[in-house]
Image (cartoon, helix red, strand yellow):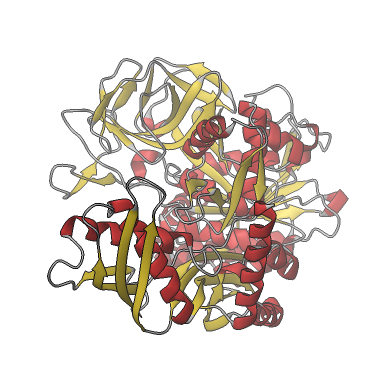
Amino acid sequence: MKVTDTSDIRNVALLGHGASGKTTLASAMLFVSGAVNRLGRVDEGNTITDFDEEEIERKISLQTALAHNEWKKKKINILDTPGYAAFVADAKAALTVADAALVLVEAVAGVQVITERTFKYAEDLGLPVIFVVSKMDRERASADRTVDSIQSRFGRTAVPIQQAIGAEHDHEGVIDLVTMKALKFDKSGSGKMTVADANDEQAAAARAALIEMVAETDDSLMEAYFESGDLAEDALRRGLRKAVGARKIFPVLYTSALGSVGVEPILDAIVDLVPAPDERGSSVGTNPADGSEQHRPVSSDAPVSVFVFKTIADPYAGRLSLFRVRSGVLKGDTALVNVNRGHSERAAGISLIQGKQLEPVPELRAGDLGAAAKLKDTHTGETLADPAHPILFPEIVFPAPAISFAIEPKSKGDEDKISQALSRLTEEDPSLKVGRDPQTGEMLASGTGQVHVEVAFARMKKKFGVEAILKQPKVPYLETIKRKVGPTEGKHKKQSGGRGQFGVCVIEMEPLPRGSGFEFVDKIFGGAIPNNYRPAVRKGVEESAARGYLAGCPVVDFRVTLIDGKYHNVDSSEMAFKIAGSLAFKTAMESAKPTLMEPIMTAEITAPEEAMGDIMGDLSSRRGKPQGVEAQGHYQVIKALVPLSEMLTYASTLKSITSDRGSYTMEFDHYEEAPAHIQEKIVSEFAKHKQEAEK
């Protein structure tokens, strides 16, 4: 494909709730424009932008895919993003390189939770938005009801620039309210369009409302409107383009993309209404030398800078980095510096990407999107730039994980393979986290939801040939004490011929405030225990505390004071005093009122208002303590403190209560004493497992 100038580029992200038709619209746009010679279908698994095996099998988008076409001599870069809650973080990353968003709203369901969430992502980045009412050919589809749904959520500035012709099986096209032309389509899927003058009273009234809305956004247009009660078509076009770019108007269009109905006018709208990269102002970053704000013009004449917004891990081709050229001209042999890490990079070659197919190009100019293979060590959210003119663009902030699973290798010896495969997957999906619990020792995989983690492991098997079992992770309980214990002796004496072992220590133990950890105080005066043996007493206490007393959980928030002891010139040793310290600790614990503490999480639950009663009732059953509720559009956000042990299976419950319209995030807040019945259960289970292990 030819090299495209900045002014001829349009970068659009397709957003919306899962199953709103984004991938189908992307396929239809590619087909109608002639970029591909057949209309791909999700049900048949042959779309350009859903190419991953898991996507084809599940029939949903799991990651952002990039494609491009040409329309009216303009290049359109299409970012097809996922719309299911577990994967929508990828949409946020895609928006950092888009210049506008097409938000799809399904004509039966109307605005849904991810519609609102992704609109907010676009709003936060100041991106123009065009609403597309999709699936107009479905049974019970309604243009009017869907527009009412959009306007009730996003305001009257969401205004139709088309009128749908028919609905359900009778949907055959649209009336363009700017030109007052009826555009009808061959519903066989060919995309063939016929144009005729529209003589429709309802469309005329809708056009008058559109003109009034556009006039409100500009003083000169308002004057012209007051003078004549109308706007000329050219003035209306200019005013609409300006208002869309300034986010003063959000146009609404209609389509049934499976039959390629209404797709051509959507392509026209992208070319006519979406700003070119250089029309949205300079790219803003920081000077890595002093942290000051730096502006870089979106121009091919500026020094080159590149932002990586996605990484694809391929077991054969290696790492593929998807990027936007923020400024300058990028060629395959351009010398670059990774500004985040400070090392040099050179792309072996640059390409356009059509789904999974690479198309090598000699260069890409400011504002364009492309891919580079085998960068040395550059990851998602990082900046590459001209070494003489570095600039650092803001990294992408991905949501914190909401759920974790313990990982158990399916085959012995596979742990290293699993670690390597997961490392590649986390490069591809930064919202997936992998680590090891320092307390339980388990390898953990954490994600935005259960499906997110399950899909990652399914992809690990298919891409890297490694399997693992996912289990509920152990809750990291802790133990502590509630009472101060007076002098307690620990004595280790052993004589079995030859040199013996002898060590005696006397300690006091007392509780400390939450979060204090462990303190060891040496209060021995004189030589009751020589200085070189006293650290061994501490080590014996620490090792025993790490193994736990009640249920094998670390003991924390306590102080041990070493006050006395005895030693033998010949038989004493570090090992003898280490054992003595351990024995003293165990004896003291018997009288110190040991107790179990459980981790308490701050949960933030977003759900439709009608589900509030059921959610509150469920939280109560989980020992949750609501901390407040606030409105967020048509949703409510509940903040609550809930024990981690009660939240391990919460994702499926919330999905059931809210019909998959709810979401939640969770982070650690503090530890507090577990209720007696919970403690009894945990201690009993620990004792049972210990007995079984000793058999």
Closest to the observer: 349 or 76?
349
Q: Residue 3 placed where, x, y %?
A: 42, 20
Residue at 39%, 53% (x, y): give it: 495
Nearer to us in this view, 368 or 620? 620
Residue at x 39%, y 47% (from the top left corner)? 497
In the rendered image, residue 214, in percent from the top left (x then y), is placed at 49, 61
Among all residues in the image, which is located at the extreme front? 497
Residue 613 figure quarter = bottom right
Give x and y (percent) for residue 435.
48, 46
Q: Is residue 246 or residue 468 the one in the foreground?
A: 468
From the viewer's perspective, is 436 left or right of 491?
A: right
- For the question of whether residue 539 can be seen, the reply is no
Residue 220 in view here: yes
Left or right of 659, for residue 351: left
In terms of image quadrants, where is residue 513?
Answer: bottom left
Residue 407: image quadrant is: top right
Q: Total number of numbered labels? A: 0
Residue 23: x %, y % from top left? 67, 40
- Side of 284 where 443 appears, left or right: right
Does 48 sit above or below residue 59?
Answer: above
**Residue at (56%, 83%) from the top-left corner?**
625
State whether residue 270 is above or below residue 158. Answer: above
Residue 42 left/right relative to 691: right
